[in-house]
Image: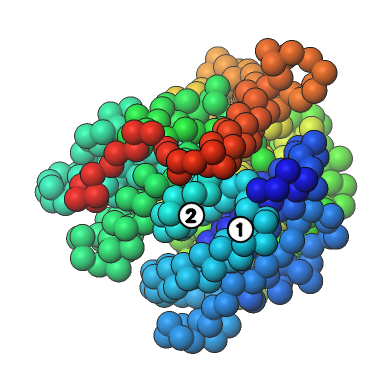
Amino acid sequence: MEEDQTNIVVFPFMAQGHIIPFLALALHLESKLRRLPNLTITFLNTPLNIAKLRSSLPPSTALRLVELPFRPSDHGLPPDADNTNALPYPLVARLLHASTSLRGPFRDLLLGLVAGGRKPLCVIADIFFGWTATVCRELGIFHAVFSGASGFGLACYYSLWVNLPHRKKPDAVEFSLPDFQEGSPVHVSQLPLTILEADGTDEWSVFQASNLSAWADSNGILFNTVAEFDGVGLSYFRRKLGVEVWPVGPVLLSEKNRRSTTPSRPDGASPEQCTAWLDTKPPKSVLYVSFGSMNTLTAPHMMELATALESSGRDFLWVVRPPVGHDINAEFDAGAWLPEGFERRTAGRGLLVERWAPQAEILAHGAVAAFLTHCGWNSVLEALSNGVPLLGWPMAAEQFFNASLLEGGGVGACLEVARGRSGEVRAEALREKIETAMGETESGREMRRRAREARDMIQSALRDDAGAGAAARGSSVRALDEFIDTAMSAVAESRNGPKISNGDASIPREQI
Ligand code: UDP
């Protein structure tokens, strides 16, 4: 790295759920690191993803969008499929394997930067791009993995992959994580499908074996989380990999940038429509119901939820998607998906929004009392940043573990399904949970108090009073400073001779 310029390379996997948090991180770095000379943030991806970003992102002085050559059809994928959003689930593993072909172009790009006197200060890459750590180690470039998942969720996920405990006890319904007791026990129904089906030889197992072991080549992990709330999972990575861990969150997209990166959903409600409806409601009176950008309910669960919302007597704003088994773009069919007369009977106190709602704005509105959520980490961060307590209905990925974290932190109440005891959700149990979160019960008051505490804690973590002493700066601000300082020291060291070392990173490869 030359003295008069700073280049940070960021590189997400080709999926909207990865590109969006990386973009949030890139824009966060741009706004927080203005002190660095001539800051450039090089955002790498494949041509179609870069083209989409280029056409939609507001202009930025620091962000440079750079393509790495990649042709999906060379890997047996449809020609326009360089993003998981364009792929059916079984082909996601193929895209993961195909993404390792970016290794050569990535290495060439770094070599070109070094040769041109623009050696990057650091590379920040996806949890699926472990090989980038190996390339960076070889070239003496500081490297960090960036996780858009919680520390706790990612620790459970990592531990499950490296131990595959359910393979060792095929008949058990519950097992412990040998290296992460804090995440135990895990019920078989809480396992992500890819892990449940993993036998060590399938496409996912083969990919993860080399991907996760390569993390040990990285200098550390940046997390979109807050140390005070999520410390247990962060500790796991310090002791397991011997790397540094920097919790720098929440890093969230502003509404302006969010609109430019999310798919246009003409049938979704505009922020103005939702806000106008919420404006008519008393403070802390509305339950917001949404299950993220991908998940949807089964048809029977949709009926149970509608019944629970109706019998709760509470106001609600529900983002409704076609149930499992229907095309996501299917015509909205309340008559088939909801109990007969539901919309008429709940008119005035319920707002149904089709497919997509302006979630960040809704959660920031004072009329929202609680959030019934699938526990996607972005949704959790958005809710807690506004002091909104959560009702957890996890469905996939590491959402079950996020739900445990929320319950443990006292800011959420989870459905039994979160503990894996049953796949079923019944209207009456749901109504009771809604009452807990919104009603004047002892536990409800406590949960709301804890959610407000979490909001204050997040605000403290993000406090950035540059003039004040280190103690007056928030933990997430300090973590970002530490990350940059560590990268700069590593660069200075590498100029003076030996290659960058990440200390005692020792995950035995044969263990994976
Ligand atoms: N989101 C939104 N409107 C919707 C559904 C989702 O704005 O109707 C946004 C939400 O605010 C969050 C992201 O999409 O930023 C979902 O991310 P999360 O990690 O919660 O779940 P995922 O979609 O990855 O399962």
- 1 or 2: tag closer to the N-terminus: 1
Q: Quadrant of residue 266?
A: bottom right
**Residue 169: numbered disc:** none
> Which quarter of the picture shows residue 92?
bottom left
243, 341: nearer the viewer: 243
Dots 1 and 2: beta carbons under 8 Å?
yes
Q: Disc 1 versus disc 2: distance between alpha carbons?
A: 9 Å
Compared to residue 38, the image places residue 402 above or below, namely above
Expressed as whole percent of the image width and height from the top left, the position of residue 458 reads 66, 26
Q: Mark 2 points at which residue?
A: 139
Q: Is residue 336 left or right of residue 267?
A: left
- For label 1, the residue is 114
Q: What amino acid type is highlighted by mark number 2? A: Leu
Q: Residue 334 location in percent, x, y?
A: 63, 66
Residue 305, position as x, y percentages in the image: 53, 49
Regarding residue 440, the answer to whether it shows in the image is no
At x 29% / y 56%, what residue is drawn? 209
